Image (cartoon, rainbow, N blue to C red):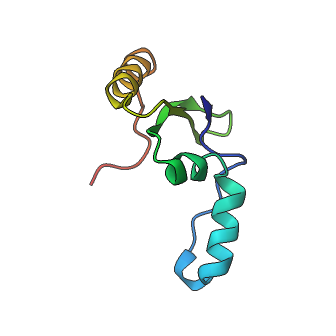
Amino acid sequence: LTPALARRSPKAGPWHERGWLRNIAANSAYSPFTPPWNLTGWPAMTVPVGSLPSGAPCAVQLAGRPGSEAALLELAERIEALRPWRRTAPVE
């Protein structure tokens, strides 16, 4: 169990204009907990758990041993049942 992000979410903006190196640096700073699982091939997922006082969404990352995908999905389902995700974006 880790936080989904290491700091507040960045403001929305045109990341494609920043360039590859700046994007890698920004991603590493905001989400340092994701790469280890991606590199090792261990299953991991991010699950919303609520909102911060600012109204920004808050989430945790769940990770498990190889082969534990079903258990992670079951745990995520339980978390989402206890803390349903409240849609904040406009519906179009």
Is residue 14 visible in the rendered image? The answer is no
Is residue 71 visible in the rendered image? The answer is yes
Identified at 42% across, 32% down, the residue is 86
- Find residue 53 and report its horizontal and vertical position in percent: 68, 33
Considering only vertical position in the picture, is 39 above or below 45? below
Identified at 60% across, 28% down, the residue is 1
Quarter of image, res 33: top right
Considering only vertical position in the picture, is 19 above or below 84? below
Considering only vertical position in the picture, is 76 above or below 31? above
Q: Is residue 71 left or right of residue 64?
A: left
Which of these two is toward me, 83 or 30? 30
Identified at 34% across, 21% down, the residue is 74
Number of numbered labels in the structure image: 0
For the C terminus, the image quarter is bottom left
Identified at 70% across, 69% down, the residue is 25
- Find residue 23 and report its horizontal and vertical position in percent: 62, 73
Which of these two is toward me, 27 or 92? 27
Q: Is residue 33 left or right of residue 63?
A: right
Which of these two is toward me, 59 or 72? 72
- Find residue 39 and report its horizontal and vertical position in percent: 53, 54
Which of these two is toward me, 13 or 22? 22
Q: Is residue 16 left or right of residue 9?
A: left
- Find residue 57 and report its horizontal and vertical position in percent: 55, 40
